[in-house]
Image (tube, coloured by chain):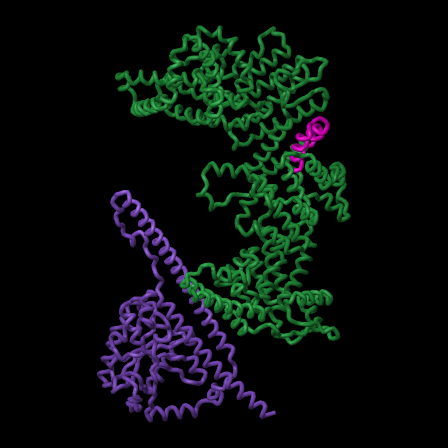
Amino acid sequence: MSRFFATGSDSESEESSSADEITPKAPGTTFKQSLLLSDDEEDTKRVVRSAKDKRFEELTNLIKTIRNAMKIRDMAKCLEEFEQLCRAFLKSKTIVDKEGVPPFYIRLLADLEDYLNQLWEDKEGKKKMNKNNAKALSTLRQKIRKYNRDYETEIAAYKEVDWGILSQCCVFGPHSLFKVRSSCKQSLAQEGEKTSEKKKDVRKKRHKKKERLEEEAEEEGGEEAEGGWEKVKGGVPLVKEKPKMFAKGTEINTAVVVKKLNEILQARGKKGTDRAAQIELLHALAAISQENNLGQGILVKIKFNIIASLYDYNPNLAAFMKADMWKKCLDCIDELLDILFDNNNIFIGENIAEDSENLGISDQPFRVRGCILTLVERMDEEFTKIMQNTDPHSQEYVDNLKDEGRVCGIIDRLLSYLETKGSTEEICRIYLRRILHTYYKFDYKAHRRSLGLQGETKSEQDQEESEGEDSAVIMDRLCKFIYAKDRTDRIRTCAILCHIYHHALHSRWYQARDLMLMSHLQDNIQHADPPVQILYNRTMVQLGICAFRQGMIKDAHNALLDIQSSGRAKELLGQGLLMRNMQERNAEQEKIEKRRQVPFHMHINLELLECVYLVSAMLLEIPYMAAHEFDARRRMISKQFHHQLRVGERQPLLGPPESMREHVVAASKAMKMGDWRTCHSFIINEKMNSKVWDLFPETQRVREMLVRKIQEESLRTYLFTYSSVYDSISMETLSEMFELELPTVHSIISKMIINEELMASLDQPTQTVVMHRTEPTSLQNMALQLAEKLGGLVENNERVFDLKQGVYGGYFNRDQKGGYQQKQGYQRDQKGGYQQKQGGYQRGGYRNQNQSNY
Amino acid sequence: KGGKKKKKPSNNKPLMQTKNEHKSVVLKIIKHYQEEGQGSEVVQGVLLGLVVEDRLEITNCFPFPQHTEDDADFDEVQYQMEMMRSLRHVNIDHLHVGWYQSTYYGSFVSRALLDSQFSYQHAIEESVVLIYDPIKTAQGSLSLKAYRLTPKLMEICKEKDFTPEGLKKANIGFEHMFEEVPIVIKNSHLISVLMWELEDKSTVADKHELLNLSSSNHLEKSLQLLMDRVDDMSQDIVKYNTYSRNLSKQQQQKHQYLQRRQQENAQRQSRGEPPLPEEDITKMFKPPQPPPRMDTLLIAGQINNYCQNVKEFTSQTLGKLFMAEALQGHNN
């Protein structure tokens, strides 16, 4: 049809070329890109094809390209494609083994060889060739010779075969040519499913086009009728069709509209197709069908296609939808849902085959092929993409974020639709979508209600009422459904993680922890895909922060340790890429990583995270350090915390703290001296409040908890550090010093005594702690350390001796028995340790005697 | 002139067994440290004197100037020569007979000391090194020791063979590295007078520094240093251990290889083929680099030194403590 416009003006061809520019493509990569795009394709159209079809189609595509290259004597291209073909053929080996070598493949090999030989003979032509081509020619000739040796019999057979088969191949040839062309951009998946239609199309048009075929045979061989093709040469866009969608007087019925729809769709994805115009066309078609009252079925079908085309509008995965497209898309989905809700008799599904569709108005319910769920999922992904690509600090971001309400609304509507009509799996999928939109939002309404407050203003109250149930209840319901019904592990894992996150966010620590422990996700999360791992990391972090709010310092520290110790928290949480890795990853990886980023409004505040971690580490580490001051084998609880301390120490001049880290370091120093007031003032002050603490929903409670913890841990630190100075100390004094109630002081000290951290006893009548002074002095400590080191020295020496004696297993055995290596605390079990050591010596001596015997 | 002093009657030991020293030299060394040495910093200087019969008399000394950053091109040798020349002009003994060095808690057995004493002793056979311990001296008893390298060690240093085998062959232990030379100090009358005067002037507390009972500080320091050395020692041993394990592993490999070779040759012979050509075995199996053992030896010597110090110190302190106890009992 586009032949009529073959004489299109220059401006039009410019238009089409400008359309081309939207999708600039390197000629060599078209094929690959089309594969890439196929992921992007409208999922409703996907049909599972046999592996054979897929492989063979790939081969035929390549063959076509080679033939084209042959025609224009582009040897370099020929060579390149031939190499690709060989690779593709190798890939389809299993199928070939089963089916035999496909005839078209043999045909190409034979033809190519003949052709090359011919070229080779043509000395004149060879001279004219440019260097590249000449080189490629000789390479290719050698290659094909070698390659054809493996197929000699087949090729010979082929050459003998009469023209009957050949003509058969011819039919196949042009057909596949058609496919090559269109699949340059269109997805293979869609292609395959349309094949049958096209075949019909092709045959119908075949006889009409015969004459033209002959004309153009020289240049383009089996040139096909479709407009998309011609544009490559003539640059005639489809837009021109618009004025006459249907010939005047045509009776517009369902069949005609469907045919038209298919026609439009066939242009889809082809090079030079004006996508915007295509969308317009579809809209027009929808309007026409509505005008003519063709029924909801066809309308739904067209809508499906409109939305799909909207998604197609962007040529690659990385680009995001433009605002107007996005709006259109939302509107369209909304309308589609309206129709679906209004008409109960429409069945949609991706498993309804194209030919079993029922679009016409009849007594039977409509049956339309397509999957609304996939569309909505895609919409959600597009939304994420838009958010990822918007500057989070701009007004634009806020505006875009406002659409979230609509997205959620659509998801909600679809959810209620699917709950009545969808299968369990579909329900699980849409539930997960809903959960993903809920889990990270703090439910202020429920929070306020739990505090017993009413909304301050009337309007807020109204809003509350309209909002319905608590997010916690919703989460619970949806997640439990998924736990029970889901069959794919991934959805369940995501649901669990979101559930935990939501619990943690709302300070339901025990539920969150139990769920985390019961799910055993910690054991196997490393096998999950990166987005799930990111979700897991987010959940862990949120869990840690929740534990901190609840005052479970140790749990908080443990939960955050993994994320914080790596120093890559930003990357692990999907909140940005690290600069230092820039050199290590290439552009491709970077793109993938960028796609994984969590949109800004879902971010976890990294400073808050680090602060929580450091403060937890401080509360754990400082008393520990004080308790094990002289212990040579002391382990660090938190490396990062120590690192911060060291950084602080290295400062030549110590000013008042500025950053959050400096505050924590300064507080730690104060705590080391048991000075809780200074520590308190460093941790909780204006600066820190605005930076960190005010970000918690229950700020006041958290601060109170913190003060309390600081007092307690400072008391412990004080006792560890200065117990050697005291003979006895009154608990009352302590309680005054640390502003803790007497019973608390009592309990802390008792605990320390029980744990043998503090060598003291409580004197009840006088309310004093009496120190026992069993802690070794520093000199004694030193001597103990020295003894230990000497033990090591002796042991090492023994090894040398062992070696001399030629016995290798000797000391290993002894180690197991617990010789010197059993480094039992010299402090507490001095006797035990010493005895063991002696045992070691004796054994050593005994063994040595034995050895000297032989 | 500070001190032209008489010599102590020598015992019947061979040359260099006794060393006479003039009090003025001691005072100069102490003064040098007081003025320039701080903490663990070490001061050094040159000893001058002459050999008389089997004694070495040290009659004078002068310090090495402290090095600073800005006079990097300062020529030490030039300075020494200049100094000695000047001394000769005023007719003082100007023969180079060794050098002195201060020490920090008895840590002086080091590679540097070994090297420089070796070169001294190599050039001037009778040279000694005087080690002055300011900390011990501050506690009330002058600590001054003279050392020389033993002839055995001299041999080894000459050959520069510090491999395990070399040391084994020389049969040298850390005990035999240095020999201490007894010191006798002679005072001129003038100096004695000065000393008396000083004693008169000094306060009671200064005089009884010797009786100080506190010990932990000194012991802690010593233990700390001792521990460091023990750590070094452990490391060296581990290194040596790895070495010997590698060595034996290689020996085994070599052995296996040779055996295989032999078998193969035997087979070939039975088949009437010529034997495989001999290959350079040493090239195929390069023996691992043996770790130098001299450092270990020095560390051992140093550890021994620390132990002696601690022993000495503790026995003294114990004595003092018993004395104090007795006194207290008496008072009660």
Residue A1 appears anywhere in the view: yes
Depth order, front residue of B185/A436: B185
Q: Which quadrant of the structure image shows residue A618?
A: bottom right
Q: Which quadrant of the structure image shows residue A48?
A: top right
Depth order, front residue of A739/A150: A150
The residue under the point 61% across, 68% down is: A720
Q: Does A448 appear in magenta?
A: no
Seen as rendered, the residue at the extreme front is B270
Residue A21 appears anywhere in the view: no
Q: Main secondary structure of the magenta part?
A: helix
A797 vs A389, left or right, is left
The purple one among the chains is B
Q: Does A414 appear in magenta?
A: yes
**Quadrant placement of the C terminus of chain A:** bottom left
The green one among the chains is A
A21 vs A768: above or below = above
| Region rendered in magenta | A412-435
Residue A390 place in picture, x, y as percent: 56, 37
Residue A46 place in picture, x, y as percent: 57, 24
The residue under the point 68% across, 72% down is: A761
Residue A487 place in picture, x, y as percent: 65, 34
